[in-house]
Image: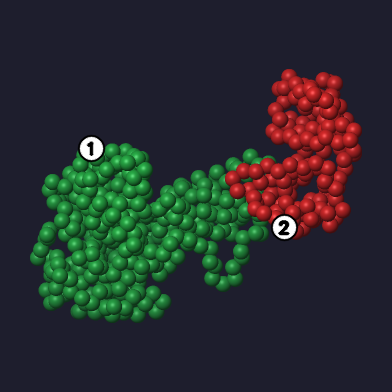
Chain colours: A green, B red
Amino acid sequence: MFWNEKIETLKGKDLEQLQLKRLKWTLSQVRHVGFYQQQLREGGIGADDIRTLDDVRKLPFTRKQDLRDGYPFGFIAVPLSQVVRIHTTSGTTGKPTVVGYTRRDLEAWAELIARNLTMVGLKEGDVFQNMVNYGMFTGGLGFHYGAEKVGLTVIPSATGNTRRQIEMIQDFGVTAIHCTPSYAMHLAEVAEEIGAELSTLRTGLFGAEPWSDAMRGELERRLGVTAYDSYGLSELFGPGVAFECPERDGLHIWHDSYLVEIIDPSTGEVLGPGERGELVVTPLVKEAMPLLRYRTGDITMLLPDECPCGRAQKIARITGRSDDMLVIRGINVFPSQIEHVLLGIPEVGNQFMVYVDRVNHLDEMTIEVEINRAHFSGEIADLARIQKKVVKELRDTLELRTTVKLVEPGSLPRFEGKAKRVIDRREGV
Amino acid sequence: MEQKKYVIRQISVFSENKPGRLAAIAKALQEEGINILAFSIAEADGFGVVRALVDKPQKAYEKLSGIGFNVAFTDVIAVQMKDVPGGLYEIARILGEGTINIEYSYAYSGKEAAVLILRVDNVDAAISAIRNGGGTLLESTQFQ
């Protein structure tokens, strides 16, 4: 099933023409952003330099750090009065990254979600429970408006209270759910524990964190759904950038809206189909926050084969990161954010170690931090207070509950050269 | 102040809750010929504080800090108890009536008497209350 068959199946010359036209538009749009004005001036790049799609390689990369440096509105290319929504995503340190949307951006985004939902067979009559965060995170509202556009009956249940979630699935006859794969696993477990049937469920849309084919099998068996992988990031609207079709062999990335390159993350060299590297995307229809060659940090490759569904070239499921970003219960965490938080707490040192485990299918992050010698009073209550303070400050910044272990001063490893502060003990994805 | 002689310096050592940490502390004290008169361990979520009354607190502080431990001094008092039923009650009653709160305490029963080590919220008030109530406080020189 297609939402917009013509555009979804656009290939070859027709697609390239559209992409080129939109790339030129994007290049004109970024000229409203100080950062790009300077980059293009320094690189001596004018509008005439983009004659073919390959000319995109002349353009500078944009990194997450650049967006952070532009906090809050440095990358907004339209007057703020035309920005009708703001979301944020975790920054690499301290402040989050801000993303903004014009009315037209929100329509374009909902259109992409509508394509994805229709592609996996959802239509009017389906009851859709959206079990992701509805706040600043793009997953909640992004899916919500796309699902309404298709005409699904949307239940904005958001996160938490698993028993209530199960009750709603049963009482409302929910046919499709959207959540992180680890939350889906938790949901399955709780349902089994209380002996709840989820007989109406047919479709599971899972994203925001990498998950394996083994996990897909497990989720399908336990929840009675067909499971689809969803990919996106806030900098490119949010979820909906790429999605599995019923073939479930790679994700269709929407080429009319995103110009895709795969690069070697260390050299920046562009790689060909079948070669694994970092996904770099130049969004083609973003009005409020246009970007050039955005380095997603996600590792994938362009798949060479045509898809039987008729849509254009796919990317492989994400297999990792080119940087040190962690995905914990669907939330992006950079070790530098943790460092930043600890630097602001005098009672503890700056050295730390992060351990990530999967307990009952949910990610758990444990942070070891040294007590600061000068702040040890000898009283256990004071230590407990420090521990609580670190947990709270981390939660405020990461929006994530963590376990904090206070350790003896000088006991954590000191690194010369590249620090290895993160030990990820989750089973391979 | 006269009461000062009853204030005893306890060493409090931060320790992760894992095998071998107490042994490391005890070994260090042994090496310096420091005698432990009484001690207790308080534990919280993943860490603990080893509290000890030693004969040479300054030396213990320097030695333990020198090998990397985080050490602090804490003022405590020591009360002699009758080593008979009701001995603890007598002391606890005095403190209770004086509205003095015990933050923590530990005890040992020696040859001559039983001794209660107390960390209280108000040391001066506790000393006065115990003396006025007929209790016997041990002077710090008896330990250190």
Q: Is residue A67 above or below residue A147?
A: below
Q: Is residue A100 visible?
A: no
Quarter where residue B116 is shown: top right
* Amino acid at the residue labelled 1: Asp
| Observer-nearest of A345 and A311 | A311
Left or right position of A384 against B108: left
| Observer-nearest of A186 and A209 | A186
* Amino acid at the residue labelled 2: Gly
Q: Quadrant of the C terminus of chain A?
A: bottom left
Q: At x 70% / y 55%, what residue is drawn?
A: B20
Q: At x 54% / y 48%, what residue is drawn?
A: A390
Left or right position of B29 against A346: right
Between the C-alphas of marks 1 and 2, the distance is 60 Å
Image location of residue A246, percent across then percent down: 19, 62
Quarter where residue B24 is shown: bottom right
Q: Is residue B78 above or below residue A286?
A: above
Mark 1 — on which chain does it sit? A
Image location of residue B60, percent across then percent down: 81, 51
Kindly identify which residue carries mark 1: A171
Q: Is residue A313 above or below residue A355?
A: below
Q: Secondary structure at mark 1?
A: helix
Left or right position of B33 against A62: right
Q: Quadrant of the N terminus of chain A?
A: bottom left
Quarter where residue A74 is shown: bottom left
Q: At x 80% / y 24%, what residue is drawn?
A: B85
Q: From this viewpoint, which residue is outermost toward the left? A: A6
Sort mark 1 into few (<14), some (14-19) or many (20+) by Cα contacts within 10 Å. Answer: few
Kindly identify which residue carries mark 2: B68
Q: Nearer the viewer, mark 1 or mark 2?
A: 1
Q: Is residue A57 above or below residue B44?
A: below
Image location of residue A23, percent across then percent down: 21, 70
Badge 1 vs badge 2, beta-carbon distance below 8 Å: no
